[in-house]
Every structure is written in C-alpha cells, then in structure tokens.
Amino acid sequence: DAGVIQSPRHEVTEMGQEVTLRCKPISGHNSLFWYRQTMMRGLELLIYFNNNVPIDDSGMPEDRFSAKMPNASFSTLKIQPSEPRDSAVYFCASSLWGMETQYFGPGTRLLVL
Amino acid sequence: GQQLNQSPQSMFIQEGEDVSMNCTSSSIFNTWLWYKQDPGEGPVLLIALYKAGELTSNGRLTAQFGITRKDSFLNISASIPSDVGIYFCAGSESGAGSYQLTFGKGTKLSVIP
C-alpha cells in the first residue's frame, strides 16, 4: 500500500518567492496534518484537517502560510512570500479520525536563500 | 499547552547493549506513541500505547504506558547498527475531542559497531 506521498522532496528557492508543498494522504484516511521540523523547535503542528475541513490552524506561524485541502486525496501548504527563516523540513501526516496513530510522509526539505 | 520532556537527548552505545529512553509530560495523556526517524526520512510509527500500565513489544522494542499516564518508556534490547536514528515520543489528550499529538524533542541514538 502506498504511504503518504509528498512533493517535492527538496525545494531551494529565493527569499520572496512563493513555495507550494503538496501532500497525498493514505487512501481512506480522513485526517491530515502539516508539521514543520527544525533543530531548534523540533516537530511543530501547523494545521490539521478533518474530512477536508481545517480544524485547527493555530500553529500556522504567519499570514504568509496558508493550507488547503480541496478533496480527500490532496492538500497543499503554501508560503508566500518565503523567508530564510522558513527553511525547515515540512511533513504531512494522515490518520483515521478518532485514531491518534498518524503516518508520516517522507517530508519536503525547504531551503530559502 | 502540554510539555513533553524526552531524555536522554542523545546516546552513544556499543552494539549489543540495551537502550532505555523515556518521556514525561506535564499533563495526562490518553495515548502514547513512539516513532523512529531515519536521516532524510519521515518518522515511522514503532509502538502505540492506549492504556495506563500497558506494556507492548515490537521485536526487540518494548514500550510502556506509565501508570500515572504522564510518562512512557521505550527499551531496545541487543542494539544493532540499524537502530541508529532519532526516536520520538508523542502523546495525545484525545479525550478532549482533539487528536493532536505533542512530540518530544527526540533521543538521538548512535550505535558503535
């Protein structure tokens, strides 16, 4: 079975550019989570969706960050404009609602120059 | 919000030795999870614990849900080189109607052949 799929795996961009990260959750999972991982702060939850509806976006750092889930099999995390401090690994995870066990994708390594 | 303290931060051990790591929280959790992250990859679920006092094994790995519901332990027996990686604990207060996970900062394990 395919796990959580994320693209791109690596992204290098210049400050001020728009960045879009993509995620395909495990088929049948109805909850989707976006995390950011840095050495300093560890894994931070940015936002999560249940049945394509955003439930809690309190972890989204600024208005520059936005996330959408137009359907059950696709989500995007957009940063516009990007800044060097956004450099991190961004993970998407999915689960069945009501189950705490989340399954992570391989991550997108973002470097903003 | 919840705080998770994971220790030790890093460990250097000889191949064949047993390993122990733990997490403590400032609040009661209903679920404890343990993940392992290999370099360049996303966290992979190792063990899930749902009940206070529960002891669960997965091969050479054993994890326990503390009876106070504020701590959890992970033991690895007879370590091998492929055990190298970062181990994360995660907890959930799912009784609050949310299935968000709070993550520890990780224990980096190095195994000396």
Image (tube, grey):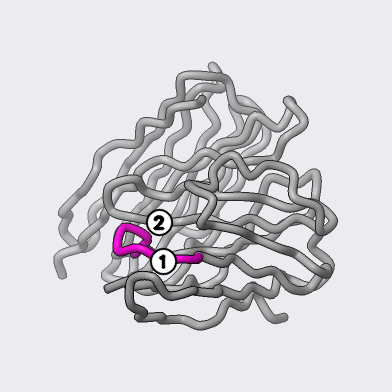
Q: Chain of mark 2?
A: A
Q: Residues within 10 Å of mark 2 (few under 14, many from 20)?
A: some
Q: Which residues are magenta?
A: A80-88
Examine the rendered structure and indicate whether residue B1 appears above or below residue B86: above
Would you say A65 lies left or right of B79 here? right
Q: Residue at x 55, y 36 (%)?
A: B91
Q: Chain of mark 1?
A: A
The vertical placement of B100 against B109, above or below, is: above
Mark 1 to mark 2: distance in Å?
Answer: 16 Å
- In the image, taking residue B4 as reference, residue B79 lies left or right, namely left
Residue bearing the label numbered 2 = A37
Pointer 1 residue = A82
Q: Amino acid at mark 1?
A: Ser
Residue A33's place in the image compared with A78, above or below, is above
Picture coordinates of residue B27 (x, y %)? 53, 19
Which label sits in the foreground, 1 or 2?
1
> Residue, x 48% and y 61% (percent of image)?
B43
* Element under disc 1: loop
